[in-house]
Image: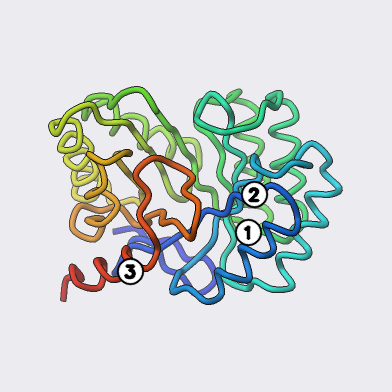
Amino acid sequence: MKTIQCKNLIFNSGLPKICIPLTGKNITSILDEFNDLNQVDQDLAELRIDFYEDVDDFSKVVDLLKKIREIYFKPLLFTFRTKKEGGVHDMSEENYFELIHMATDSGLIDMVDIELFSHEESLRKAVAFAHEKHIKVVMSNHDFHKTPDKDEIIKRLVKMQENGADISKIAVMPTCDEDVLELLSATMEIKNKYGFPCITMSMGRLGAITRLSGELFGSCMTFAALKNTSAPGQISAVKVKEVLDLLHLE
């Protein structure tokens, strides 16, 4: 099994890491969330910067990151989720990659989310620059409409690795129980055949089990809610921690 280390965290080893996405809309609400986060048992935070009302002003984004780093010292994942993959803010692809470059160059983040289905050359450059800055890349794909078949899920996760991802991530929407099994089966095959770190989840009520069973099937991180959810089916961080500890494989 290939592992990835970010600060003190080792992904793809032991319990899935608990990541809490924060979705505040302004500096005050975001910093309040980070202060609250320090009272919760978690491993890392995801700043969903597409929720930030001043995200188009990159200087304000840097100022926000500086303020976050004064109060939060665990690994920080920086994510702008595009509208086509479930985000809340419209941004041109050119500006999307400029934002990623700026955050990467700031020295204030530890991990960056980059969407697989982006302009190929821009994707390669963003990954190379992140690695140059010693920042881990979570390459992602989200389908809020359906669950691709097992082979397609595996194909996308492998393609992320081929494009330089440190961790491959896919989130899909199930329409039936069989879709959830398809996602879990694909995850187990990645674990047994390829061994690279991946994050997989089936969204909504049907897919809730996939957010809790990562240690068995091979997903190395799960997203849990502090107060507000950032995706359908997220479970509170407190409950996720309790269940993960109960299911921990000795």
Mark 1, other Cα within 10 Å: few <14 / some 14–19 / many ≥20? some
Do callouts 1 and 3 mark residues in contact (Cβ within 8 Å)?
no
Pointer 3 residue: 241
Q: Is residue 30 left or right of residue 236?
A: right
Estimate the spatial distance between the alpha carbons at disc 1 and disc 3, rounded to whole Å: 29 Å
**Which is nearer the N-term, disc 2 or disc 3?**
2
Q: Mark 3: which amino acid?
A: Lys
Question: Circle 1 sits on which residue?
Answer: 134
Q: CA distance from mark 2 to mark 3?
A: 30 Å
CB atoms of marks 2 and 3 within 8 Å? no
Q: Disc 2 on helix, strand or loop?
A: helix
The answer to whether 75 is drawn above or below residue 39 in the figure is above
Q: What residue is at 19 percent from the left and 37 percent from the top?
A: 180
Residue kind at label 1, given as amino acid type = His
Q: Position of residue 6 (x, y in %)?
A: 52, 65
Q: What crowding class fits label 2: few (fewer than 14 Cα within 10 Å), some (14-19), or many (20 or more)?
A: many
Q: Is residue 250 above or below residue 195?
A: below
Number of the front mark, 2 or 3: 3
Residue that numbered label 2 is attached to = 130
Give the mark, 1 or 3, whose residue is nearer the N terminus: 1
Q: Position of residue 17 (x, y in %)?
A: 39, 64
